[in-house]
Image: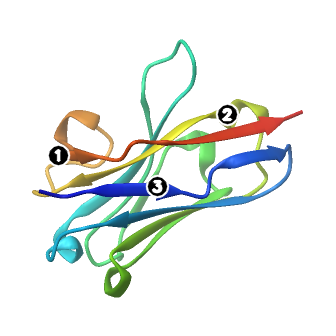
Amino acid sequence: QVQLIESGGGLVQAGGSLRLSCAASGRTFSTYVMGWFRQAPGKEREFVAAITWSGSRTYYTDAVKGRFTISRDNAKNTVYLQMNRLKPEDTAVYYCAADLYGLGYSDPRVYDYWGQGTQVTVSS
């Protein structure tokens, strides 16, 4: 069983920054692909970013490239999402997820565990 707990969400003005954290339980955290997804009201959950177990590869949706950075600290069992130059359209509940078997990175169906989500609101 893997538990994921997100933190760091909040209200920020457009152009501002936030850093989300996701703390994971489980002794094999360093073997998981970790991803961040978001869901805005009335919309489907969408992929934001993912990082391989070693951190050597990262993936981003086009909408956040150049503004968001995903990283991980395997010693702390934590994955981060640094969000800069935030826009009102980034407003959503952000979820972290763990893919235990490395079956993909952008498809939410391959992720095995999910956090409870943290709200990010960007005001214009």
- Residue beneath label 1, please? 112
Between marks 3 and 2 in the image, the one whose residue lies nearer the viewer:
3
Q: Name the amino acid, label 3.
A: Glu
Sequence order check, earlier mark of 1 and 3: 3
Q: Secondary structure at mark 3?
A: strand
Residue 90 lies, with reference to residue 71, above or below; the image says: above
Query: Position of 70 compared to 103: left or right?
Result: right
Residue 104 lies, in percent from the top left, at 21, 48
Residue 79 lies, with reference to residue 6, above or below; the image says: below
- Residue beneath label 3, please? 6
In which quarter of the view is residue 110 placed?
top left
How many other residues sit within 10 Å of disc 2, few (<14), some (14-19) or many (≥20)? Answer: many
Q: Name the amino acid, label 2.
A: Thr
Query: Position of 15 compared to 84: left or right?
Result: right
Q: How is the image coloured?
A: rainbow
Query: Residue at 61% across / 58% down in the picture?
Result: 8
Separation of marks 1 and 3 at Cα, in angstroms = 16 Å
- Residue beneath label 2, please? 91
